[in-house]
Image: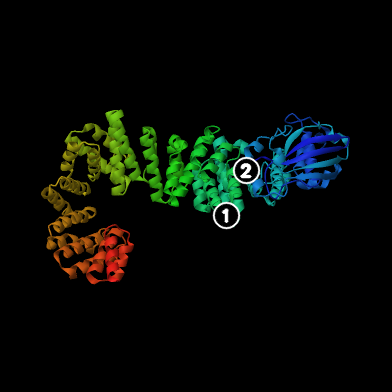
Amino acid sequence: MIIYTHGVRVLKLDERRVRLRVFLADYDPGNLLPEGPSFFFGVLWQAADGEAGRRRGPLNGLVPLEDTLDPDWVEANAGRFIESVERIAARNLPAGDELAGFYETHYTELDRRLHRWHERWEHEDQLVQADYDVVVTDARWLEPLPEGQGMGTGFASWGWTVAGGQLVRRGLILKDRGDREGAAHAFRRASAVDDPEATVRALLALDDLDIDLDALNFDDQVAHEARAALELCVRLSREGRAADARAAFLIVHAFGMPEFMGEARERAGMVSPAERAHRLMSEGDRFGALNELRRAYDGGDEVIDFAVALLDGDFETADATGPGGALDHTRMALIAADLAFVHGREGDDDTVAALLKLRVTAELGPTMWRYALESGNAYPEEVAAAIGERLMRTMVAMHLPEDVRHIAETAGARFPGLAAAAYAELGDHYAVFGEPEDEAVAWALASFWTSVDELGGTEPAAQALVTLARILDETGDPVVAEAARKAATEKAGPELAVGDSYAAFAHARLLHRAGHGHRARSLLLEIAEEDDRGAAEAMMFLGNHAQSVDDTETAREWWLRAAASGQPAIVHRAAMQLGYLAKITRDLSDALRWYGPVIESDDENAALAAAHLGELCYWLGDEEESLRWYDLTLSETDDPELVAEAAFRVGEMRGDRAALRRAADSGHAGFAEQAGALLGELEQ
């Protein structure tokens, strides 16, 4: 935020009279132009403070700083120094949306004019402003002022209002001077001002009144202050003090510790500044959105410009916004990450894609991914996994193996499928550009994380790596075998039992994907001799491969072995393949043998199996049985393709208009069109 409220310029001096021009610098519809002597006392005291090229004067020596920070003292004593104030002329009032837009456009320029109000600004005639004649009680108070002097004034500093911020600053000064009671009194007064940031900082200061923070090392001090702000945020949220809780959260956010932000999201429902700004923009509150960003990224003008461009959907401008430094660069990346997950949850894939194509995403993709996970913004799981994969694919396309590795390591146990895919891509990369050992480690870790995903945990997956190492020793691949043993030890320790051969199957599948078909087949044949989940998967894979080259008899043999494996995850998959072979040969008895158990179970393919039997009976002319199976299909699924076929056949055989309408409404090409045509004929 702009750290001062108004700019002041000395126009004319005449003994005890000075004419001042006051410009509104920080646009606030509720605080446009000053009234009364208190403001002008502050101007004269500041003009005599000897700072920023200003002269030192007697007023500054007479009134100590802490008194100027006490609004009550200033209100009661300003008349001792200011005899009268008369506003001569005001310009650019009343304020409206157009004026607010002007201030937004020139926000950065105004922020940077703090010490430059002696210079004329090309746009200053458009600012809210007024001229004042101020008469002082003693000409000495004007001694430091030369005509033409200018300065920024009205410093909130420790709050969102001048009064609140000044009281907090007063308390801190008194604390440093050892005046505990005076400091506590100032903090209590600050906490009662209608100023959430001042309230929160005052409450935190009260809690720390007897703590010497300077005695803590830097890391401990940061941890203490971040934890205190977080706990205050949670407490204020539970008390229903939403604005104060938000102010506390912004202090937490300023520490840049994503784990604390994640805890605030979980315990107090806090969202990131970028997400809150997006919500406010969506509600039409642009001013509120900008204030949120300015409070969160104080001093980061380029960061705010970047965020606003993203919120406006102007990705070209955002991409052209250069960061002011490394911190700004990181902030930009984290804002892009926050908004990517927000739009991902809203189902806006186009915006997600645009955000992930930004230059800052390509440069800091792993940082964005880690931050999203740790800050709690990476949810729900399917959105988080999809965005993580997009980031990973971007790193792959740019040939950045270390970034791919970082994404894989961060994904870990929460997203084992993503970790597996990332390590598989690393294996592909190292196969061309790396050393055999690097390739081997990548393949081993890809197999490990695939096994974590399928076997349900780190330990069984590590045990599966031990089995992979044994089988590879037997098939003559010692480099990957050693990498697998090492990975197993790193993930679960040296004392591991032999496990499932699933990791070996995953490795064989990777070999096949990489074009090493002969090596993959040799390994799969070896795995198929085991008696576990991996062996059954190998049988299915070999059967599917045989079918792909039109070797139906070999495919049937492998699928029969898989169906007899006793592995629950495999038996029904094999049955679906065997049932389909029976269907295409119009063997109803064999089709019932395989499809029947699938239909009777809770298997996800039950409706598909019923639809296959419905179609087979339709081919065989058994209308009654066909209707029975198709009715079952319609009762078990909303899948558009299955509904289109089943509803059309039911409508066709029964002349059922409702079924035909359902088929037509499915939107599936082919059956939906046929249903519409038949419905038209029936209704003529």
Residue 205 place in picture, x, y as percent: 65, 45
Whether residue 411 is visible: no
Q: Is residue 372 visible?
A: yes
Q: Is 586 drawn above or below residue 225 in the view shown? A: below
Q: Is residue 498 above or below residue 641?
A: above
Q: Measured from the top left, where is residue 420 in percent x and y? A: 32, 42
- Which residue lies at the image location 77% right of the left edge and 39% below the top edge? 21
Where does residue 442 sit, x and y in percent of width and height? 30, 35
Looking at the figure, which quarter contains the N terminus? Answer: top right
| Residue 237, numbered label | 1
First in sequence: mark 2 vs mark 1: 2
Foreground tag (2 vs 1): 2
Instruction: Return the residue nearer the eye: 329 or 179.
Output: 329
Callout 1 secondary element:
helix
Task: Give me the residue at 14% from left, 64% from top.
Answer: 620
Q: Quadrant of residue 110?
A: top right
Q: Nearer the viewer, residue 118 or 68?
A: 118
For badge 2, the amino acid type reads Glu
Who's the residue at 38% across and 46% down the image? 386
Q: Residues within 10 Å of mark 2 (few under 14, many from 20)?
A: some
Q: Which residue is mark 2?
A: 104
